[in-house]
């Protein structure tokens, strides 16, 4: 259902975290679908932010990039005072393993940064503030699927910080009437994903015949959604009626464990299963997430379109064709982090 009071096609969008994986894919889709939209990306360019992710839109009319921190009031308030119809907050520290080693930046960006944005839109109203949350706020779900009413039980510092930002955003709706909507999506995959996350790490390691580090048993499952389906869901919500104050789960009903995902990646890269190596498990590793996204489907008709096998094949092909994008990222700081985080276990005899 289109909302005729919100100018989705010609509106002014502030996309925070737009130089990251999902934010960039969202901006690509937005500018492709609505060439008349005016899009400002605000991004701090942390290790995970990459200006190259915006190359496909950089020269389009209506696009602008601002480098800066969502926690910086002196930047955020005057920027939002310029006037926006939509603020879509993708900006976050996002890697669970890093949050275990060093939670401080997660609390700062994923909670305090959200507060700064909310204060700015309180002073300078917008038509819609979209807080991009995550299915991790529900904690591990051993069976069934979490609806939006399920209790929040985040179990790692990333998920807990995201739950803080998620509820803080809702509180600005309940308390001040700010038009906030919160989305909770499952695990995204696709082009431009920083190669520390499961799929891009395994694809790029496989290309280089390096080991694929499997945490624990490899039986932990996630619901895998193509990033373009996530981006399309957010765009649909921007144009839908009655979403203010609501939470929407976004998922794809494609539950796969790490070994199942690895099997498809090895198949599409043409590499052997002997590359799989067990490493010491992630502390507090959530066994399973699954969201029920019926509410969004009923409200807007949105549903995921990219089938898993085809999406994974396209993703592998993208990394094979874009070594110039990922090779520079797998150096320096990344290698230090990788050495520190991964403890390979001795192979069992006879294997
Ligand atoms: P990412 O790590 O690839 O990108 C995050 C972006 O935010 C980067 O460009 C980074 O530079 C920027 N950023 C970080 N701190 C900032 C700050 N203080 N100010 C401004 N910019 C800052 O992450 P992603 O995977 O694209 O995730 C985007 C959003 O989606 C996050 O909010 C994440 O919690 C959420 N999410 C991710 C997934 C997933 O599977 N990746 C699933 C559900 C929800
Ligand atoms: O569920 C949504 C969340 O998905 C997002 O909110 C997070 O920002 C995003 O990072 C992602 O979190 P996960 O922890 O699920 O993703 P990650 O790619 O780190 O891990 C996916 C699974 O793969 C998980 O069970 C851990 C496992 N894994 C991961 C890595 C990086 C391994 O076995 N080996 C690895 O090297």
Image (cartoon, rainbow, N blue to C red):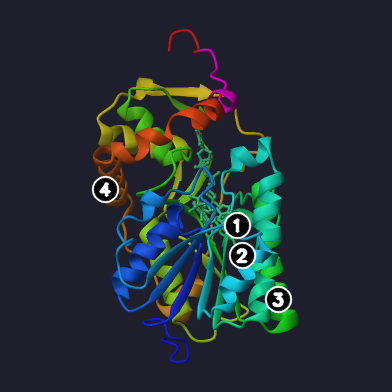
Which residue shows up at 54% across the image and 55% down it?
A: 290
Q: Which residue is mark 4?
A: 314
Mark 4 to mark 3: distance in Å?
Answer: 40 Å
**Element at label 3:** helix
Which residue shows up at 49% across the image and 73% down it?
A: 296
Q: Which residue is mark 2?
A: 75
Rate crowding at label 1 as few (under 14), some (14 to 19) or many (20 or more) other CA atoms within 10 Å. Answer: many
Asked whether disc 2 touches disc 3, contact meaning CB atoms under 8 Å apart, the reply is no
Closer to us: mark 2 or mark 3?
2
Mark 1 to mark 3: distance in Å?
Answer: 21 Å
263 lies above or below 228: above
From the viewer's side, name the closer residue of 244 and 144: 244
Task: Tell me where the magenta segment starts and ends, as one range.
Answer: 339-346
Q: Which residue is mark 1?
A: 69
Report which quarter residue 302 is drawn in: bottom left
Q: Position of residue 45 (x, y in %)?
A: 51, 50
- Residue 172 is marked as 3
């Amino acid at each position: 259902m289109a909302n005729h009071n919100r100018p989705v096609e010609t509106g002014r969008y502030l996309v925070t975290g737009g130089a990251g994986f999902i934010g960039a894919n969202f901006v690509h889709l937005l500018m492709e679908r609505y060439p008349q939209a005016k899009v400002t990306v605000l991004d701090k360019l942390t290790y995970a932010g990459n200006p190259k992710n915006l190359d496909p839109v950089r020269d389009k009319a209506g696009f602008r990039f601002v480098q800066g921190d969502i926690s910086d009031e002196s930047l955020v308030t005057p920027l939002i005072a310029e006037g926006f119809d939509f603020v879509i907050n993708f900006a976050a520290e996002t890697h669970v393993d890093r949050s275990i080693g060093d939670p401080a930046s997660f609390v700062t960006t994923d909670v305090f940064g959200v507060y700064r944005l909310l204060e700015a839109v309180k002073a300078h109203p917008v038509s819609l503030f979209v807080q991009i949350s995550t299915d991790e706020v529900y904690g591990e779900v051993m069976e069934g699927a979490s609806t939006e009413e399920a209790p929040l039980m985040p179990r790692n510092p990333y998920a807990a910080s995201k739950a803080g930002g998620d509820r803080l955003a809702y509180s600005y709706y309940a308390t001040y009437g700010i038009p906030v909507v919160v989305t909770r999506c499952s695990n995204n995959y696709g082009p431009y994903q920083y190669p520390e996350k499961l799929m891009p790490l395994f694809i790029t390691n496989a290309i280089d015949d390096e080991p694929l580090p499997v945490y624990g048993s490899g039986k932990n499952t996630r619901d895998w959604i193509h990033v373009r389906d996530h981006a399309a869901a957010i765009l649909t919500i921007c144009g839908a009626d009655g979403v203010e104050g609501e939470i929407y789960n976004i998922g794809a009903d494609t539950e796969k464990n790490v070994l199942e995902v690895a099997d498809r990646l090895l198949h599409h890269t043409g590499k052997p299963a002997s590359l799989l190596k067990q490493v010491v498990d992630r502390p507090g590793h959530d066994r399973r997430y699954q969201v029920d996204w019926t509410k969004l489907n009923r409200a807007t008709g949105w549903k995921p379109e990219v089938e898993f096998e085809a999406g994974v094949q396209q993703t592998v092909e993208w990394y094979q064709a874009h070594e110039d994008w990922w090779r520079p990222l797998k150096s320096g700081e990344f290698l230090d982090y990788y050495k520190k985080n991964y403890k390979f276990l001795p192979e069992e005899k006879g294997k």
